[in-house]
Amino acid sequence: MTSGDHISKQYDVELESIRSRILQMGGLVESQLRLAIAAFENADLGGAEQVVAADRRVNELEIELDSAVNAVIARRQPTAFDLRLIMGVARTIPDLERIGDEATKIARAVKWMHDKQVSTRMPRVPDIRASAELAANMLRRSLDAFARLDVAAASTIIRADQGVDERFQAILRQLITFMMEDPRTISTSIDMIWVAKAIERIGDHSKNIAEHVIFIAAGTDVRHASPDEVARLLADVEAK
């Protein structure tokens, strides 16, 4: 084996290690999110505290991955696909960290509602659970698309974000109605809006990860493009 072959293989190992660690971080964040959703649904204070505690590890992984990316750039000076991969990873890291932050917000809302010992019975808001399931599904699919660099799957995730946005608007309408009909629900309704907004932002960050997958695999920047524009851009790439 020549020195060049050895360096090339070591470089491949470094890139694969970074990809694997991104998926490890994504798995931790997905677990954190699902635990936060369950804690909110079941008013589970213990589960909420676990979510808050897990955020420290997510932050540690962010720092570790940033350092690994910077080291590869400095040592290897990647080009072409490898450069897109490194740039895509660098963009994905903060999105995953922020999803962890949003999951922590949901958990903190559980604690606030527990501490307030709200006596007024709030009507259920099924759209919160439905929105949370949509966002969690988007995250899982975006991580799968990242693992396989699946452009077609990433494109469907971008379109799915519209559903999360629509659910958020429906939740706002429901909670505003509750507050107008019974002012005693205002404090708890505000906490629930906080949760709904966190879920909506998780959908946004999952969509961002899907956009990074398309950038890595196809070399096309689809940030700020509508789902229809993304479909047209990808069709143009395939036609070339």
Image (tube, grey):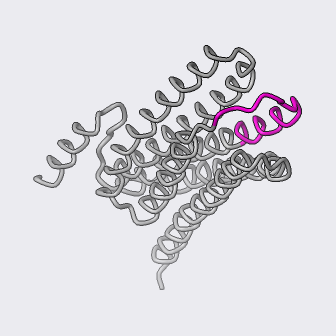
The one nearer the camera, 31 or 10, is 31
What percent of the width, then of the height, locates residue 172? 53, 25
Specify whether 71 is left or right of 167.
right
**What residue appears at the point 63 percent right and 27 percent down from the top-left corner?**
193
**What residue appears at the point 38 percent right and 61 percent down from the top-left corner?**
149
The one nearer the camera, 82 or 186, is 186
Q: Which residues are magenta?
A: 104-123
What percent of the width, then of the height, locates residue 132? 56, 46
Picture layout, residue 56 above or below residue 188: below
What percent of the width, then of the height, locates residue 121? 74, 32
192 inside magenta stretch: no
Total marks in image:
0
Residue 176's quadrant in the figure? Answer: top right
Residue 111's quadrant in the figure? Answer: top right
**What residue appears at the point 42 percent right and 33 percent down from the top-left corner?**
166
The one nearer the camera, 52 or 107, is 107
Specify whether 166 is left or right of 108.
left
